[in-house]
Amino acid sequence: MVKKKPKLQFRYYEMGAHEQVLALLGEDWRRPYGINISDLHFHNYMEVGICYEGKGKCILRDTVEVFEAGCMTIVPPNYPHNNETNPEETAFWEWMYFDLDSVLRDMKELSFSKLDTEYISNALYESALFFHQDMHKKISNIILEIREECDRKAYMYREKLRGLLQSFVVELLRIHNVNSAMPRKNPRSFQVAPALAYVKEHYNEEIRIRDLAKACNISESHFRRIFQECMNMTPNDHVNVIRIQEASRLLLKSHATMEEIAYRVGYGNVSTFNRNFKRMLGMTPYQWKKSPDNYAGQMLDFKISALKGW
């Protein structure tokens, strides 16, 4: 009997206006993790986890780490992962989500030198980081200070967070030994970076795989192969993830019709939009829009059942 591959879930978070951090703190996150859940998931923002109690395992794409109190995780956007507590046990984690694109824009504006934010974001999004606080004390202290600012929300906390987040980025780059003169560990991820940028800019237009391959200056067959290797999904699946993510934002934040939203995110007609939306989320756009959980700011599980390789 062939073992069924796990599905991927896209867990979408909505960041508050003028915010760069979404913090999920408190006793609600003392719980068993991963019970009866075989799926890995990924997020639209960078996830930072702090473990206070419990034991179990962190699954970070193809790597499994054993967690305990004092461990931290830094997981890039679109990076498959999951946590599982030991049987009949609970764990206490707190979670924060960072809008690093916004942070890098701030850094570019303030930098005294020409800052290659695209290079930096590609470097930071390439791999996840699992560590005990004693292993990387500087970045651990920054994370804990960010957590404290999010909890207290004292005077000018947003301004304080902006500085802390920039320090976070610098320390994370140093941990990964990133600088402009050093080759990256996995140069293939940089080969597909132009395609990711192309999708981000042109998702509302017709996108063909040969256009993405051309942006990367490689053949279409080679592009398909390395894209799957780097992103754990096909190029078409990635385009749909970006389009449905933007459609979900429009469904929550605008009064546009389904037809208008379909065209605004790049689908030629509403039936194609509905079909792809339901394939990924398990419900129609109308059903999703009417769900009260979406407006309560709760986590949304976007089940992507058709992704290959899982």
Image: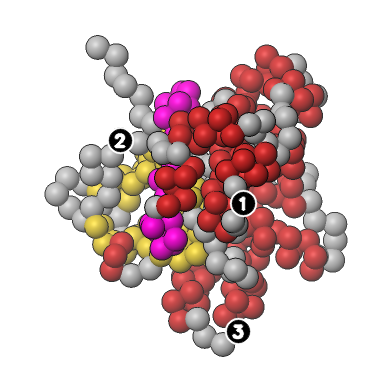
The reply to whether the C-beta atoms of the residues labelled 3 and 2 are less than 8 Å apart is no
| Kind of residue sitting beneath label 2 | Ser
Where 84 falls versus 163 (above or below)?
above
Q: Tell me the distance, in whole angstroms, between the alpha carbons under discs 2 and 1.
A: 36 Å
Q: Looking at the image, which is closer to me, 159 or 186?
A: 159
Relative to 10, is 190 on the left or the right? right
For marks 3 and 1, give the one nearer the viewer: 1
- Depth-wise, is mark 2 or mark 1 nearer the camera? 1
Q: Give the residues in magenta.
A: 292-310
Residue 91, percent across and down? 26, 57
Quadrant of the rendered image containing residue 34 = top left
* Residue 168 seen: yes
User: Looking at the image, which residue sits at the far right?
Assistant: 113
Separation (CA) of disc 3 from disc 2: 42 Å
Mark 3 crowdedness (10 Å alpha carbons): few <14, some 14-19, many ≥20: few
User: Tag on residue 38?
Assistant: 2
Say which mark, if any, is on residue 156. Answer: 3
Q: Secondary structure at mark 1?
A: loop
226 relative to 65 in the view: left or right? right
Residue plotted at (50% across, 30% down):
275
Tell whether label 1 touches label 2 (CB within 8 Å): no
Which image quarter is the C terminus in?
top left
Q: Residue furthest top?
A: 1
| Rendered-image quadrant of the N terminus | top left
- Of 251 and 87, which appears nearest the observer? 251
